[in-house]
Image (cartoon, rainbow, N blue to C red):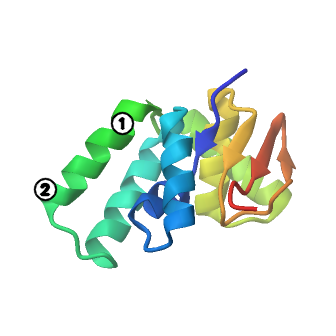
Amino acid sequence: MSLAFIDSNIILYLLSGDPAKADRAEAILGEGGIISVQVLNEVVSVCLRKLKMTWDEIDCLLLAVKAACDVVPLTVESHEKAVEIFRRYKISFHDAHICASAVLSGAGILLSEDMQDGMHIDEMTIRNPFR
């Protein structure tokens, strides 16, 4: 069974005031998974802009996430796949790039609360782990 690809919103629930979602996010990360550099960038952006976290706090979070997950790079190939997905499925380009990275990594499942639960893109299915 392949690892699931994990969207940034799942990682950010580790910091949630909602204990059920925080616990579920922790369990997901405990199983391991795949993320992209884009996911790391989105987490940093939210931590800085919305959560007003310090760099020491962000570094601690990033270390834990990178220890739990395989990190795939952004590439010209992932960009081209994102363009294809964007055109075909009419989803936001940022979401299309997350989906592209998930597909190219070989993940059969993309865990995301923000995308359409049950949507199939190539051999990958989007699942909302909080449903």
Asked whether the beta carbons under mark 2 and mark 1 sit within 8 Å of each other, the answer is no
- Please state which amino acid type lies under the numbered disc 2: Asp
Mark 2 closeness class: few <14, some 14–19, many ≥20 residues within 10 Å:
few
- Name the spot of residue 124 as percent of width and height, x first: 79, 38
- Identify the residue at the far top of this view: 1
Q: Specify whether residue 75 is in view.
A: no
Mark 1 closeness class: few <14, some 14–19, many ≥20 residues within 10 Å:
some
- Name the spot of residue 131 as percent of width and height, x first: 76, 62
- For the point 37% across and 69% down, the residue is 46
Mark 2 secondary-structure assignment: helix
- Name the spot of residue 20 as percent of width and height, x first: 56, 64
Q: Nearer the viewer, residue 25 or 95?
A: 25
Q: Nearer the viewer, residue 121 or 14?
A: 14
Dot 1 corresponds to which residue?
66
- For the point 48% across and 48% down, the residue is 26
Separation of residues labelled 2 and 1 (CA atoms): 15 Å
- For the point 64% across and 36% down, the residue is 4
- Name the spot of residue 33 as percent of width and height, x first: 55, 34
Horizontal placement of 94 versus 124: left or right?
Answer: left
Q: Nearer the viewer, residue 100 or 52?
A: 52
Q: Nearer the viewer, residue 25 or 82?
A: 25
Total number of numbered labels?
2
Mark 1 secondary-structure assignment: helix
- Please state which amino acid type lies under the numbered disc 1: Lys
- For the point 49% across and 60% down, the residue is 22
Dot 2 corresponds to which residue?
56
Horizontal placement of 89 versus 13: left or right?
Answer: right
Horizontal placement of 42 versus 122: left or right?
Answer: left
Q: Which numbered disc flags the more N-terminal residue, 2 or 1?
A: 2
Q: Specify whether residue 41 is in view.
A: yes
Image quadrant containing the N terminus? top right
